[in-house]
Amino acid sequence: MTTDNAKWADILIHLFAVASRLEGEGQYNLAKLTRAATDSLCRQETHPLIIPSDKDKLTAEVQKVIEALTSMNMSADLLSALKQGSEFMAQGKLSPITATPHPYVCRSCGYVTLSPPAEPCPKCGAFAETFQKFMPNYWFDALHPEAARERLRQTPLVVEKLIEGLSDDVMNQSPSDGGWAIRNTLSHLRDAQGVLDFRVDLFLKEAHPILESKAVFAWAKNEAERPPSARDTFETYKASRAETLRKLESLAPSDWDRVGEHEEFGAITLRQQVSYFAAHEATHLSQIEALIQ
Ligand SMILES: [Zn+2]
């Protein structure tokens, strides 16, 4: 922390207050810069902090968060959802949408609700449409269909270039921190691609398909079910991707608006699902690059 905590809190609160005022005056470009600065400052401070990834320790961290938020009178509904969600995590599961709905925050007064607001804010009277909805990540709406398809086409080519000439030994080598080898990342890309392909079929076959929550991340180290070599894994991924792209290219424009019910994320469209997978892959490219270094 570059400055003492109280001063730091004062600066952040002032930045948020100024941003809101700027928005109120229609000075949206100044407001966006102020909000970006606030976000940047918070990320700069949090980036070096080490929060454990071990699920029991992480569950304890969430418990500390709940206690801190309780002392600040945070919405009981939000705290209860956080508690329920962390109980799923403690059991090694992903928290479903039923336990942890999307939160909506009143942009004027900060009132929180866990159901889509239909009435004006009970605290300040702001219109329901002005609430900010918090989605689990930015991937859902990151890419329009055309950009998503292009990304899905390009990523295997980028990966192919990255692993060009690497031996299986190199790709099988686990880093000293116990993290993923290149082979595990390739398995993960292949697994995610398999889920995407399966879901595209489901969206097209059924009117309102149930999309089961998949802990795809946890499969990457599963040695029981994988092709004999990292390169075979890559080839499976690439071939399956070509097949998915063929399906996506034959969609009618209205197909992109088909809606499914995701166990973890709630109602999502095919457009959002494809954007999600296309944007998700990019986060693993730097992982492969780092391992090659
Ligand atoms: Zn309000």
Image: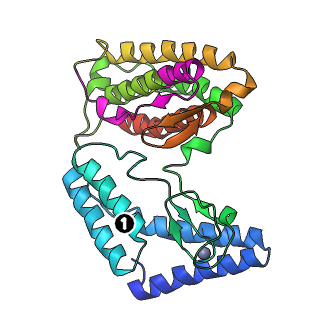
Tell whether 169 sits left or right of 123. Answer: left
Quick check: is 216 in the magenta stretch?
yes
Q: Amino acid at mark 1?
A: Leu
Q: Is residue 108 visible?
A: yes
Residue 210, position as x, y percentages in the image: 47, 30
Pinpoint residue 2: horizontal percent, then vertical percent: 42, 79
Q: Is residue 103 above or below residue 127?
A: above
The residue shown at (67%, 73%) is: 126
Q: Quadrant of residue 291?
A: top left
Residue 203 to residue 78: above or below: above
Q: Is residue 228 left or right of residue 125?
A: left
What residue range appears in magenta?
Answer: 196-223
Q: Nearer the viewer, residue 247 or 74?
A: 74
Q: Quadrant of ligand 1?
A: bottom right
> Magenta segment: does it hold 116?
no
- Residue furthest right in the image: 26
Q: Does residue 259 sit above or below 90 in this rendering?
A: above
- Residue hosting label 1: 79
Question: Looking at this view, is 156 or 117 the one in front?
Answer: 117
> Front-most of 201 and 232?
201
Corner quadrant of residue 93: top left
